[in-house]
Image: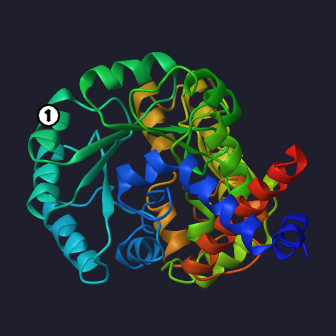
Amino acid sequence: MSNISTQSAALTDSERTAARLELDRLWARGTAFLGTEFAILGGAMSWVSERNLVAAISNAGGFGVIACGAMTPELLEAEIAGTQALTKKPFGVNLITMHPQLDELVQVCLRAGVGHIVLAGGIPPASAIRIAKDGGAKVVAFAPALVLAKRLIRMGVDALVIEGAEAGGHVGPVSLTVLAQEILPHVTDVPVFVAGGIARGDAIVGFLEQGAAGAQIGTRFAAAEESIAHPKFKAAFVRANARDAMTSVQLDPRFPVIPVRGLVNEGSRNFLAHQADVVRRVQAGELEKDAAQLEIEHFWAGALRRAVIEGDVENGSVMAGQSVGMVKAVQPVREIIGELVEQAVAALAHRSSRRGN
């Protein structure tokens, strides 16, 4: 039994009640903004964050978020309707700012009554923010630095997510511990949710005490029972360690590689060999620079689907955050959220007892 589990089992009813009240106080701004019992968002993960997982997170008291990705407006409309058939609780939709039909996707969300729209993948256009807010939705955006956080607030976003490099998938270069110190003390206008490498409730408490409104979690939910990810994909998470989740390596600065964190496998090793071959062909005059860049970028085309849906965890892209080392089993979403809350409560009760309260 873990130390936190031992502490939790030893709590009296009054200690547990007091700690739970303190947790509710700490993330009150987040729960009020989301309309949920717990200020825990599901990270939007392509192929994973669809109706089943999103509804399960919302039904368990968290806030599920559909990953729209490259969906057409028609597909997104169907996915929202499918999610609404599974839950009456609040959930959001994550839209990629570079999507060529972004404004249409926002309108799809508004017509369906989606109350929260998350704009990700770059600085959102002012038009999309305006359309969403005029339609009655709350807008959430990602802030990788303090200067951008302030800019986004001026643009009218209602909440921010700060995501550290520990996260899975496409990541920035700065860890959450640094981003939290840079941003949380200086942004009080809107709720700020933290993300990246979070897998325990006591860690959430630490960020709440720094001023965060809640936390976004992806990796643990990707391996949840309700996730449609292939059993081999989930098994890879269970056996992985934190050091197995690495960002993609760029071999030559002339050919940029977007950093993506995932489990090291045969595919990631082949990607290095592929880059080396492309560079060799450019140097030999066999390939133009632009064509070479496209060859590098196209290497991973369809690789995430191969891993998540088909279960090819050796050649596919197994996107995972460094918190994957704390995924010990495939669990129901309700159990995962229950553990997070129990760990948070135990941590707060322990701190209170140390202070002699």
Q: Amino acid at mark 1?
A: Arg
Please state if 218 lies on the left or on the right of 295 as rendered: right
Please state if 234 lies on the left or on the right of 304 as rendered: right
Q: Nearer the viewer, residue 287 or 48?
A: 48
Q: Nearer the viewer, residue 105 or 347?
A: 347
Q: Is residue 64 visible?
A: yes
Q: Quadrant of residue 9?
A: bottom right
List x then y, in percent, for residue 306.
Answer: 51, 70
Residue under the point 34% across and 29% down: 123
Rate crowding at label 1 as few (under 14), some (14 to 19) or many (20 or more) other CA atoms within 10 Å.
Answer: some
Q: Which residue is mark 1?
A: 130
Q: Is residue 319 visible?
A: no
Location of residue 82 with respect to 148 vertically, above or below: below
List x then y, in percent, for residue 253.
Answer: 61, 22
Residue under the point 57% across and 33% down: 172
Please state if 329 lies on the left or on the right of 88 as rendered: right
List x then y, in percent, for residue 329.
Answer: 73, 79
Residue under the point 9% across and 40% down: 134
